[in-house]
Image (tube, grey):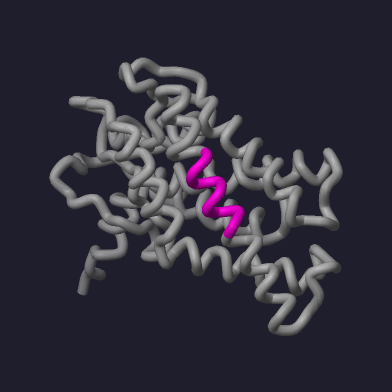
Amino acid sequence: MNRTSRTCAAVLLAAGLAAAQEPSSDQSEEKESKRVLWIIPNYRTAPSIDNFHPITAGEKFKVASEDAFDRGTVGLAALFAGEAQLTNANRSFGQGAAGYGRYFGTAYGDFVIGDYMTEAIFPTLLHQDPRYFRRGKGSGWSRLGYAVGQIFLTHGDSGRVQFNYSEIVGNSVAVAISNSYYADNRTAGDAVSKLGAQLGVDMAANVLKEFWPDLQRKLRRKPRE
């Protein structure tokens, strides 16, 4: 996992842990925010698993498109590209504006390919639901464990809990595709590192999605005079 991935994951997990210190409250009447921390796309989060109904293949592709082409995704790609250029992660990309353009293009490509693989293509082929269903109940620590576990567990179109093949296999295929444009990082170790980085960031994002309504209430709370 590179430095930017570790930093992003750490920030997201810290935010979730901060929210986990307070008991949860009913979130069912709150309007779902389209972005977490005003930048991270949040189109595939559902407030609850209650009254589950499957979504169509077209809806899965719509969710992936909303995530892939959101301005927050573009901003995250710009951040990753800047860090990669600073560390000269891919020497063949070069430096300067042209080099940054290559770093940005590949970073954004990683996000777009990953979103379509894990939220549309494999969920459609495997009949799995790409949404994150917020638990919203129980202690903060139980919700934290649930959020982390959703990287490995998901719901099928039938509503039953299944191993999250869409996340694991989808990201693995995305990493394999990325080898075509990362000429300097094509070893097996590089591939494992990239996959671990993506799963770590997705895991941290799940934690923040779980606790985002709690954090919003904290941020809106006025200080006592």
Looking at the image, residue 65 sits to the left or right of residue 73; the answer is: left
Query: Any magenta on residue 202?
Result: no
Residue 112: percent from left, percent from top: 52, 53
Would residue 110 be counted in the magenta stretch?
yes
| Number of marks present in the image shown | 0
Magenta residues (range): 109-117
Q: Residue at x 26, y 33 (%)?
A: 48
| Point 36% across, 38% down: residue | 60
Indicate the position of residue 213 as horizontal and vertical percent values: 29, 51
Look at the picture and state if 192 lies above or below 222. above
* Nearer to us in this view, 51 or 125: 125
Residue 120 or 21: which is nearer the viewer?
Answer: 120
Single out the residue that lies furthest toward the left. Answer: 29
Q: Quick one: 63 or 180, which is closer to the camera?
A: 180
Residue lying at 77% horizontally and 56% vertically, measured from the top left: 182
Query: Quick check: 145 left or right of 108?
Result: left
| The quarter of the displayed image where residue 181 is located | bottom right
Q: Name the main secondary structure of what is drawn in magenta.
A: helix
Percent coordinates x, y for residue 190 in the rendering: 80, 46
Left-right relation of 225 to 130: left
Q: Position of residue 102 (x, y in %)?
A: 69, 70
- Name the quarter where the C terminus is drawn: bottom left
- Image: 44 above or below 69: above
Q: Residue furthest bottom?
A: 96
